[in-house]
Image (cartoon, rainbow, N blue to C red):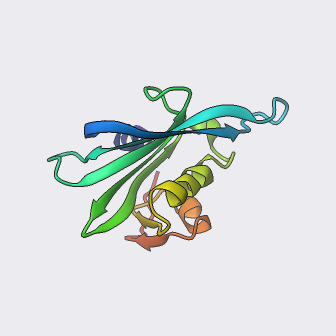
Amino acid sequence: MNLEDTIRERATEHLFDERLVREEDVTITLVSAVGPEPWKAYFLEGRVHPHGVLRGGRILIGLGIEDPLAALAWNVERGKKRVHHLWVDPDARRHGVADLLFSLYKKHVSPKLIAVGPFTPGGLAAAKRAGAKLVYGKLIES
C-alpha cells in the first residue's frame, strides 16, 4: 500500500459507534469555467480504532458519506482534540479543500487546531496556513 492509499484509508476509516452529528452545505470550485459547486460536509463522531477507547470524529466532504472528496480525522488525547489525518482527492488538490476542512474543524469541533505529523508537504503547508500548533512536525517522503 502506498502513502496516498494509507492516508486516505486512515482519514476515511469508520469509527466504532459512529453517528452523524451535523451536515453543512459547502461550495467548492474545482473547475473555474464551471464555478462554485454545491457539496456537503458531514461531521461524524464515535470511538477511534484500534481499541475504541479514544473519542474522535471525522469531517467528510462529498456528495455522500461513502465516497468522499476529502476527509479529516481527529481524536481526543489527554483531554485535547488533535487532527491526525487529512486527505484530499488528487483531483481536488490546490483548490482550497484542505483549508476548508481546517476551517470547518475550527468552527464546529475546536477553535484550537493541533495537528499531529508526520506530514506530507501539502499537509504541512495547509496546517501552517490554518495556524495549527504542530506536534511532531516531521515531513514524510512521498
Identify the residue shown where x is 54% and y is 58%.
107
Q: Is residue 125 visible from the viewing direction of this image?
A: yes
Q: Nearer the viewer, residue 7 or 73?
A: 73
Residue visible at 58% across and 59% down in the picture: 126
- Horizontal side of residue 104 vs 77, given as left or right: right
- Total labels: the figure holds 0
Q: Is residue 48 left or right of residue 40?
A: left
Q: Residue 80: image x %, image y %?
A: 33, 68
Query: Which residue occupies the extreme right position in the image?
Result: 33
Nearest the viewer among 3 and 81 is 81
Work out whether 132 lies above or below 64: below
Image location (x, y in percent) of residue 12: 39, 38
Q: Residue at x 44, y 71 (%)?
A: 134
Q: Is residue 1 visible?
A: no
Q: Residue furthest front?
A: 21
Q: In the picture, which quadrant includes the N terminus?
A: top left
- Asked if 49 appears above or below 68 in the picture, the reply is below
Q: Nearer the viewer, residue 61 or 1?
A: 61
Residue 33, by quadrant, is: top right
**Image height of 40 relative to 76, above or below:** above
Q: Position of residue 96 (x, y in %)?
A: 67, 49
Residue displayed at 77% across by 33% down: 31
Nearer to the camera, 87 or 43: 43
Q: Position of residue 83 (x, y in %)?
A: 40, 58
Going by the image, does 63 lie left or right of 19?
Answer: right
